[in-house]
Amino acid sequence: MSESVGHLPHHGGPAPHEDPRPGLPRQRRGTTPQGFGRYPDFDVLEQVGHWDEVTRRVVMARIDVVPPIRFFDESEAATLGAFCDTVLAQDREPRIPVLAMVDKKLHAHEGDGYRHAGMPDDGEVWRRVARLLDAEARSLRADDFASASQGIRDTLVGRFAEGELDGDGMSVEKAWSVVMRMVLSAFYSHPWAWNEIGFGGPAYPRGYARLGAGEREHWERPPEFEVDPVKDVKERGVE
Amino acid sequence: MSTRSATLLRGARRPPDNDSAFLLDRHRRAVPGRETMARHREDEEVDMLIVGCGAGGATLAQRLARRGWRIVVLEAGPFWDPDEDWVSDEAGSHDLFWNEPRVIGGTDPVELGKNNSGRGVGGSMVHFAGFVPRFHPSDFEVRTRDGVAADWPISYADLKPHYELVERELPAAGEHWPWGNPHGYPHSPHPVAGGALRAMDGARKLGIEFKVGPVAIANGSFGNRPHCIYRGLCLQGCKVNAKGSPLVTHVPDALAHGVEVRDGAMATRIEIDEAGRASGVTYVVDGLGHHQRAATVVVAGYSIETPRLLLHSTSPRFPDGLANGNDLVGRGVMVQGAPQVAGRFPEEMRMYKAPPPEICSEQFYETDRARGFARGFALQTVGPLPIAWAEHVLADGHWGQALREYMRDYNHWYTLGALSELLPLSENRVTLADGKDVNGMPVARMDYGQCDNDRANIAFAKQTLHDILEAAGAQDVLTIDRYAHLVGGCAMSGSQETGVVDSDHRTWEVPNLFVADGSVMPTQGSANPALTIMALASRLAERLGDKRVGADGRRRVAVA
């Protein structure tokens, strides 16, 4: 394996809960979650004028309208908000309002087309995950998950991801897949996340023309690192 | 101007007996002719009532309407207007899927919804990637050749003329195809993105050959369908009308020949008369019950809804559901193993560009006993957008900052996928669960598990993908296990004891009840099923139209 991929988790890159972020520049144009990104001069929203009207309405609503919390109660929202922040490493503003997006979907009874036998419906899975995380946090002497230290939250989420929490009759592996499906779908549907990863976004009716390796449309921007991954790997002695 | 002279002027090669591409509007994507569509009374006995307007139902309706049949198609989902209803966005395309509740179980449960189900006129092909490979001749005789699963009661030769017809209607674009029964395509291969070229190079070093295509995307002039703009959102519904789905390839011509498509119409029961024949279908629109009489009923709701409707249509004569006297309805439902392996490259690949279906290899399609399992797999490109890519990263075990870092690296990755032929197993089946939907109809439950042959196949395919990406110079790889496609559940068979329908798609138990979708497939090969579903419907239409099999169930000419 080449040393040049030392920024990636398999090759000495960040652990799930590592901070500070490894050599990322501050975003200079537009917004990214937490204000960092790989493409500091790329703002996908500068392309809105090239999107078809229907797509523009759907995508812009994600930025313009933060839906109120209606499905979860206050305590569930606090716990699950902290869960979403932890699992996505959203540790400061600006944050993509992931839990509000999840709440909106559950409030509208918008299904995803299946549920595992023996599992409750998706909304109930979320509520049980909230109770589960709070109970586990209390067993580690915190008041609840939301007020627990970042270290405890990271530990618990890590155990949840490994299927090691006690689901009280519910499969935690399946619960993990239910909640993460919705978390990822909300986060990576948001244009701020597209800025962070350099995704070109909606492309109708304009389309894409530069398809080759290393090629960009004239309005796409190159990635940028402040830390040379090769040097970084050597300095940190991780390879 | 007539469509025929317009064709001459536009220089497109016209498929025989299907004007769909020429009936579309050049400036709007909605299907013309909805306002003037034929309307039938519910107490009128139409010649044929089809449940489901996807690859099977729409193709059958279009063919037989041209023969003068009076046809009504019931479609549970909407009659799409791509301009208004579809968006160039991943999460915003959620409504293209069958999102109604279903239960999944078994040792290796199959997640439903996106990726393997459709809802609305055009069916799942509205959001399929676009790959349209043929089955190989061997697929029809796997029991004889490889000692697994079952032979089909028909052969490749029966479907070949229909493959050729449908490929002209879609139209299919690709290189000359060296595998299976070698053949060419009506349209030239599309240009491919940098990642696909890199993968082809890597494969070549290992002696593995890829070809470009075959995809149901016009490459050049084709009626009033615009050229592909390579925006990469094929799985979100083609707003361009460049990618073929029944909505643009068969529904326009069907409407022009008198087919009535009732959208938002959810079939709940097939009714049976005193003679044990299907008399019509009960369905629900906006919560209100309706009933349409018909001389022939065809179910084309795909591998979950078709068994569900048959199982729910109980009566004193058929207490276990229609065509289920031998307890085979819903059994043998199949998915393909579809692991994906992504490779990280020094250059940006930006895999969101170009259609996800780019290149394909069928070099591993046939049985090679040295590999330690029967049958094989195909290799294809995938092109996940950010949400699908995030699921891929999560599946490799990453969350938090590690997930974010792999996501920030998105543009450096390129993804290949396999389609492993998994075998039909009797215990993999669709049944009715305890819960009910909004119409009071029991929801479907799908149980699924793999056998040892399946696991060996998937493991070998994953290793092959891994090797290709390494040979191509990938610096890191991520792997995700998943499934794709759905077929089987109402298998076609040579005898009443071994299947649900005969070689003419007619249920063994009810003479005027047919199944015309992917559920009739006894095996699935390693090919994406859309083209074969259409070709089967095309063949059935020809046999019904020629009266080689009577719609009333009386066989007029012996079937070979």
Image (cartoon, coloured by chain):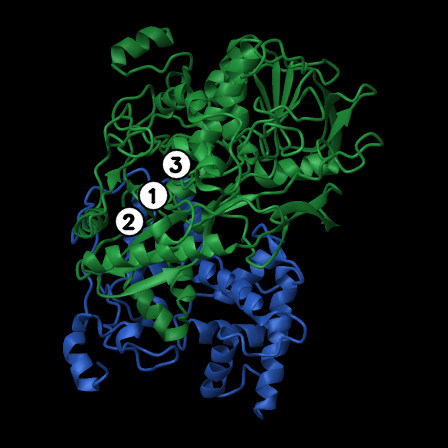
Chain colours: A blue, B green
Is residue B463 shown left or right of residue A222? right
Where residue B528 sits: x, y (%)? 42, 39
x and y, in percent, of residue B143 in the image: 49, 38
| Mark carried by residue A47 | 2
Three-letter amino acid code at disc 3? Answer: Cys
On screen, residue B229 versus residue B516, left or right, reads left
Secondary structure, mark 1, is: loop
Please identify, in this view, whether the residue under mark 2 or under mark 3 is nearer the observer.
Answer: 3
Label 3 neighbour load within 10 Å: few <14, some 14-19, many 20+ = many
Residue beneath disc 1: A51
- Residue at mark 1 to residue at mark 2: CA–CA distance: 7 Å
Distance between mark 2 and mark 3 Cα atoms: 20 Å
Element at badge 3?
loop
CB atoms at circles 1 and 2 under 8 Å apart?
Answer: yes
> Residue under mark 2: which chain is it in?
A
Q: How many other residues sit within 10 Å of disc 2, few (<14), some (14-19) or many (≥20)?
A: some
- Check contact, mark 3 vs mark 1: CB within 8 A: no
Residue assigned mark 3:
B238
